[in-house]
Image: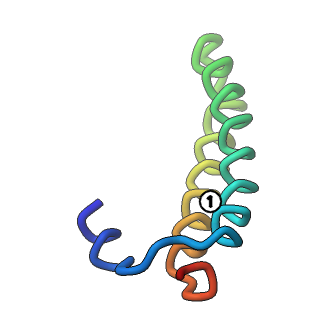
Amino acid sequence: MIKLKKLLNEDINSSGYSQLRKPIQGIAVALKDLLKGLQSQNDDVVIPEIEYIHEKAGELMGILKNKKYRI
């Protein structure tokens, strides 16, 4: 978290928040599916959901690093 604060000296603008919303909504759905997969101990669900969440987290970081979405 400290690295992220050093990276971002500027606030996120409204367009940035709009861009962040899309991957976050996907993560929210994936987390629900991941919890179901964990309860049933189903590797065919758990592994792809973790990979999807990891991919979306990288997408979120890319948005935060983009100066276009900062004030």
- Residue positioned most to the left: 2
Query: Label 1 sits on what residue type?
Result: Glu
Residue 49: x and y, percent? 66, 40
Residue lying at 57% horizontally and 75% vertically, measured from the top left: 62
Front residue of this view, candidates 33 and 19: 19
Find residue 68 and report its horizontal and vertical position in percent. 63, 87
Q: How many marks?
A: 1
Q: Nearer the viewer, residue 31 or 5?
A: 5
Q: Is residue 8 left or right of residue 15?
A: left
In terms of depth relative to the viewer, which is nearer, 13 or 45? 13
What residue occupies the far top of the structure in this picture?
40
Give the residue displayed 29% in from the left and 60% down from the top: 1
Q: Is residue 17 above or below residue 38?
A: below
**Vertical placement of residue 35 versus 63, above or below:** above
44 is higher (above) or lower (below) than 13: above
Image vertical order of residue 14 relative to residue 35, above or below: below
**Residue drawn at (28%, 71%) of the image:** 3
- Residue at mark 1: 55
- Of residues 64 and 42, the one nearer the viewer is 64
What residue do we see at 72% from left, 62% from top? 18
| Residue 10 image position (x, y, % from top left) | 42, 79
| Quarter occupied by residue 20 | bottom right
Where residue 38 sits: x, y (%)?
58, 19
Label 1: how many Cα within 10 Å (few below 14, some 14–19, many 20+): few
Helix, strand or loop under label 1: helix
